[in-house]
Image (spheres, rainbow, N blue to C red):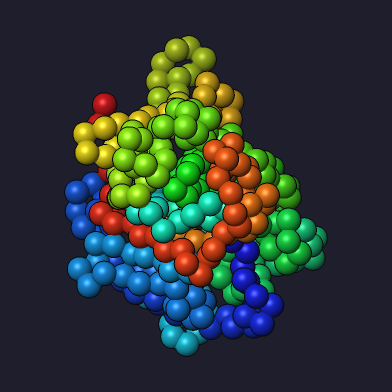
Amino acid sequence: MLRSCVLAVLCAETAADTLGAFNISVDGAPMRFYAVSQAWQGRFFNASADGASVSLTAGGRFYVASERMPTPGALVPGSYWQAPLLGRELSYTVNLAAVGCSCNAALYFVSMPGHNASDPAAADAPDPTNGGDFYCGANAGKSPGNNYCPEMDILEANRYAMQVTPHECNGTNRGEGFYDMCDWRGCFANSYLAGGARAMCPHANCTIDTTRPFRHAVAFETTTTTTTSGSAAGDEELSAIRSILTQDGRRFEFPVCGQNATYLKLMTPNLRAMVLTFSLWGVSNKGMSWLDGMTGCTGDCELSASATSWRDIELNTIVS
């Protein structure tokens, strides 16, 4: 995911801001949430007047909070919305028409706030890092001064391909929130590899035509664990992750993490509460080949010309 600072000159700009407010429907009830980040990220962000959609243009990253952040001031880790995902389905309408090859429009969850597991002398409190946002992620710890934590990528996509990926991490003996390494690659599922060239692509004859908005849903299905005697223990355990794309009556569905029951079990505790994050970023054609290289698309990301939006976001309990 996008690093905490896009340019070195911006790393010192850690003043917090509430970039805007928008709605997420939770089990049918519209709820007000806040897009928060460093103040300089506001140049990329926009929310519609009715609160139904949020967008990023030419880059940016923001987090979802349950309340406004002080302005000016520091981001408050306890204010981030800790979304419950087990036994629920997240859905939204996304527009990838202006997200070209080697660019990445991302909607994902991370186990923020992060903790510094690389320094034995670091405090037990959450670590704000150089960006002042308490960010962490499955690849974030590769960069000095940033921290690892579990990540659930709902959407990493452009017009040519989409990836949905859970990332599990190794904990430490310092307790909850401290991770010294993560599965960088994750147990990924790629739309092109799962459905072929015409499943999702920028053409009218594709099942999902990415030149127009489409609906995407990711369901976290669970089973109830049992005791050694066979009786129900009452704990939910992740049993499947399903990714479903729909558009004009057409449907493309692919499973995530296949039949890897062990990996799904490891992800279970992480999905009980994670922070929703949005970003738009890009790199060279070679650097983004893990996402779209198999499609044959060419060219580096033209981030300044990129834009994406998400609207009608819903988080609903799965009814069996």
Res 206 → quadrant: top left
Q: Position of residue 33 (x, y in %)?
A: 32, 65
Q: Quadrant of the N terminus?
A: bottom right
* Number of numbered discs visible in the structure rendering: 0
Residue occupying image coordinates x 80% and y 60%: 120
Seen at 73% across and 67% down, the residue is 145
How far from the left and from the top, in percent, is residue 42? 44, 77
Left or right for 16, reference 207: right
Looking at the image, which residue sits at the far top? 229
Residue at the bottom extreme of this rendering: 72
Residue shown at 50%/33% (left/top)?
Answer: 192
The front one of 320 and 199 is 199
In the image, taking residue 17 as reference, residue 139 lies left or right, namely: right
Q: Is there any visible trace of residue 172 in the rendered image?
A: no
Which of these two is toward me, 210 or 315? 210
Location of residue 186 in the rendering, given as x and y in whole percent from the top left corner: 61, 38
Left or right side of 282 for 216: left
Find residue 9 and report its image quarter: bottom right
